[in-house]
């Protein structure tokens, strides 16, 4: 008999504080790091089909890459992780699958994993990490470990962060998995042995979303590369980078205050300030395509802007003081063939609600 296990997780916009969640950068803030996020109604999906029986077979299919790969043993699955992503574009899916199958001792049975994402790869909306959350929750369901996720979602978050650090061969931050797990408009507070989520009222999240749109520029960004450059500069003590990080943290704390008070005008100002300081992290953060998108959106009434994720491409967040300006903006035809305009809608629920 075939069993089917499914999970979905929301992608996110990082309103403030991203990149600072890399260890040990966040440990340098005495009161802990503050990151602000909104989960989106744009999801990563994972479906696992299981047939119990003798022998091992795993088929992994990605709808996004329109390809699949099969394995006849856990050893074959493990060995495939030594290939490059050019040789093995589904390596991230294979890595997560191997971890859960190997640690559960499931070396017998027939499995099919199928994944898809509603955002383009490299969009800056936390796509790969969100896909990791969807896969992790689906695998926990498939191997009968739902209680594992319910009791300690932070352990799942840390497992996925560590797996992704190996996958990208650079330190991975903590932030992207959190809105994918919890959903909503949230503030993630982290410090030494501290991981907490503060959930803001969903009524305000819906109101705030009506002021925001996204422009996907068609140029994927490379968060691991950009963040690694910032990380090295920070560790090496580069003053301009350290000063920018301090200012980003200050802005993120101010944005938390504005989220609590519901001050949308101030939130727009904080978005601009965050972007101003983020660009000081490196010359590659504000790619030409982002500048072009910002210039165009400004002519249509947008008043605040920032790149999503580590910059260098991906998506540009655009904020409007007036809801009607945002509503008109998302109806506009895209000025570039590769650009996609998304209205922002907040997802109230995260992957944990599926468990």
Image (cartoon, helix red, strand yellow):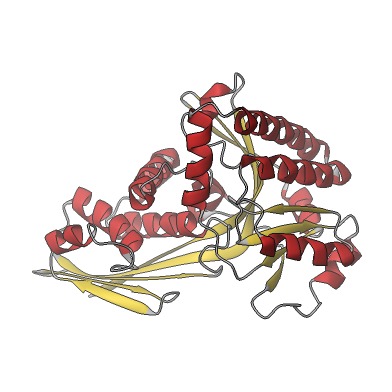
Residue 55 in picture, x, y percent from top left: 9, 69
Q: Where 38 sits versus 245, above or below?
A: below
Please indicate whether residue 168 sits to the left or right of residue 60 in the image.
right
**Residue at 74% from the left image edge and 43% from the top image edge:** 276
Residue 150 in picture, x, y percent from top left: 42, 44
Please indicate whether residue 199 sits to the left or right of residue 177 in the image.
right
- Please give the count of numbered marks on the rendered protein: 0
Residue 208 in picture, x, y percent from top left: 79, 53
- Residue 286 in view, yes or no: yes
In this rendered view, identify the residue nearer to me: 355 or 17. Answer: 17
Residue at the outermost left position: 54
In this rendered view, identify the residue nearer to me: 309 or 264. Answer: 309
Q: Where 168 sits versus 30, above or below?
A: below
Q: Where 330 sits versus 16, above or below?
A: below
> For residue 113, what is the image quadrant?
bottom left
Quadrant housing the N terminus: bottom left
Q: Where 57 sits versus 208, above or below?
A: below
**Residue at 50% from the left image edge and 37% from the top image edge:** 231
> For residue 296, what is the image quadrant?
bottom right
Quadrant housing the C terminus: bottom left
Residue 72 in picture, x, y percent from top left: 13, 70
Please indicate whether residue 14 sits to the left or right of residue 258 in the image.
left
- Residue 213 in view, yes or no: no
Residue at the outermost top position: 30
């Amino acid at each position: 008999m075939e069993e089917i296990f499914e999970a979905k997780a929301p992608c996110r916009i990082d309103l403030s504080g991203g990149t600072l969640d890399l260890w040990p950068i966040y440990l340098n803030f005495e009161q802990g790091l503050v990151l602000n996020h909104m989960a989106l109604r744009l999801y990563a999906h994972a479906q696992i089909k299981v047939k119990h029986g003798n022998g091992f077979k795993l088929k992994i299919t990605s709808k996004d890459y329109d390809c699949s790969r099969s394995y006849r043993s856990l050893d074959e699955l493990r060995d495939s992780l030594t290939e490059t992503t050019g040789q093995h574009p589904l390596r991230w899916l294979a890595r997560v699958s191997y971890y859960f199958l190997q640690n559960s001792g499931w070396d017998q049975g027939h499995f099919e994993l199928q994944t898809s994402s509603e955002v383009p790869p490299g969009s800056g909306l936390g796509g790969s990490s969100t896909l990791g959350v969807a896969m992790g929750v689906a695998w926990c369901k498939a191997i009968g470990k739902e209680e594992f996720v319910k009791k300690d979602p932070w352990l799942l978050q840390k497992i996925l962060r560590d797996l992704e650090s190996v996958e990208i061969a650079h330190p991975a931050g903590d932030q992207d998995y959190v809105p994918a797990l919890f959903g909503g408009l949230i503030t993630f507070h982290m410090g030494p042995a501290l991981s907490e989520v503060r959930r803001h009222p969903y009524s305000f999240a819906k109101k705030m979303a009506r002021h925001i749109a996204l422009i996907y520029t068609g140029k994927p960004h490379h968060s691991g590369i950009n963040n690694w450059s910032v990380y090295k500069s920070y560790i090496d003590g580069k003053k301009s980078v350290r000063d920018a990080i301090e200012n980003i943290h200050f802005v993120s704390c101010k944005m938390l205050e504005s989220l609590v008070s519901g001050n949308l005008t101030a939130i727009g100002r904080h978005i601009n300030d965050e972007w101003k300081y983020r660009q000081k992290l490196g010359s590659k953060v504000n790619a030409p395509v982002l500048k072009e998108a910002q210039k165009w959106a400004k002519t249509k009434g947008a008043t605040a802007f920032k790149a999503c994720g580590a910059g260098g491409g991906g998506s540009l967040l655009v904020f409007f003081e007036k809801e009607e300006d945002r509503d008109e903006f998302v109806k506009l035809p895209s000025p570039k063939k590769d650009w996609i305009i998304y209205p922002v809608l907040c997802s109230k629920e995260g992957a944990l609600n599926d468990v």
